[in-house]
Amino acid sequence: MVDDVERAVAALRAGELVVFPTETVYGLGADAANARAVQRLFAVKGRPADHPVIVHVARASQLGELARDVPDDAHALAVACWPGPLTLVVRRDPARVVAEVTGGRETVGIRVPDHPLALALLDAFGGGVAAPSANRFGRVSPTTAAHARADLGDDVRVVLDGGACRVGVESTIVDVTGTVPAILRVGGVSRATVEQVIGRACVLHTSGEVAAPGTLASHYAPRAHVEVVEAAGVAERARSLAGAGRRVGVLAPVDAELSEPEAVVVLGAPRDAEDFAHVLYARLREADERELDVLLVVLPAGDDGPAAAVADRVRRAAH
Ligand code: TXA
Ligand code: MG
């Protein structure tokens, strides 16, 4: 494992790309201070140049190295939530984060991931690592090394395998550059936690204008058509679709008590919202592997934290 981290650090220093695990999803990393490496990152990812990527660092003290005018809210959130699934959007220091990372924006998203292999890599590398999720643009985020390899193939030589990601959906993004902190993407850290830490309400800015480019379009969609249904309506909907010759799958919490017809493929039964988030992307990939036409999804109960993140990603996939 030490060898692997050394190899990954050497690759980053040489301007190459590295796939590494985080607690949310796998990242495709490049040296955030190397414009050419970041350009290659965008090319391999197939991502438009104006979509900013998140910079990953080993510790909260690096916030002050990469950003300017860091507000108290940011320091408080960093202390409370890092390492963890929270990204802070702050003002970029142009000397430390090249403009290519942020699509020319004056702000940059920064986070300290909570995964031992990611932290070992970031610590040994020392600087910031720019990393979007390690999937090709428009595909479902990878939550295992095998998913990332399947998407990126030979374009990336160094892949650090840290097992299945614990959280399973991308980080919560909080923009602290305005007068009121704004949540741009819901994820592993709940809104309640953010508000408790900063001691006041924040706004939810996850739809409408493109606050965090890349969260709007159907970026979380498998090939199968995704439909959100109530538990009580699953059986009837599945029967009618199956009757019309469609291959139907169901993803629902274990307590949903379905009475689906036999022809339906049941894709696991997550125990609770956390477990749902943990398995969600693997199940979306499985829907495609099984060549399902339609995936019926019953959302987990709850309206914050993992339940909100699952609902957000599933609704985007269903778009
Ligand atoms: O959990 C995560 O955040 C994962 C892991 C690898 O850390 N990363 C991730 O990256 O999801 P990506 O590139 O797939 O999504 C990053 C999101 C995009 O929607 C982007 O628009 C937003 O973060 N973002 C990044 N920098 C931003 C900025 N300066 N202002 C607004 N949004 C920003
Ligand atoms: Mg992504």
Image (cartoon, rainbow, N blue to C red):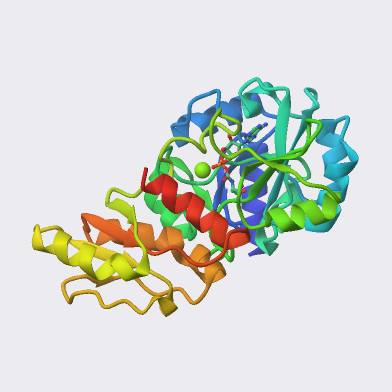
Q: Give residue 185's quadrant in the image.
A: top right
User: Residue most toward the top?
Assistant: 104
Numbered label tally: 0
Q: Give residue 284's quadrant in the image.
A: bottom left
Question: Which of the four quarters of the rendered structure image does ligand 1 lie in?
Answer: top right
Observer-nearest of 159 and 69: 69
In the displayed structure, does residue 246 sit left or right of residue 278?
A: left
Q: For the N terminus, which image quadrant?
A: bottom right
Residue 182 in the image, given as x and y percentages of width and height: 71, 39
Residue 21 in the image, given as x and y percentages of width and height: 58, 57
Q: For the C terminus, which image quadrant?
A: top left
- Residue 312 visible here: yes
Observer-nearest of 181 and 56: 181
Residue 17 in the image, given as x and y percentages of width and height: 56, 40
In the displayed structure, does residue 281 sit left or right of residue 82?
A: left
* Vertical arrangement, residue 53 with respect to residue 105, above or below: below
Tell me what residue is drawn at x 50 percent, y 57 percent.
310
Residue 57 in the image, given as x and y percentages of width and height: 75, 46
Tell me what residue is drawn at x 78 percent, y 36 percent.
180
Tell me what residue is drawn at x 74 percent, y 29 percent.
97
- Residue 23 visible here: no
Observer-nearest of 51 and 269: 269
Q: Give residue 244's quadrant in the image.
A: bottom left
Tell me what residue is drawn at x 58 percent, y 61 percent.
306
* Vertical arrangement, residue 313 with respect to residue 43, above or below: below
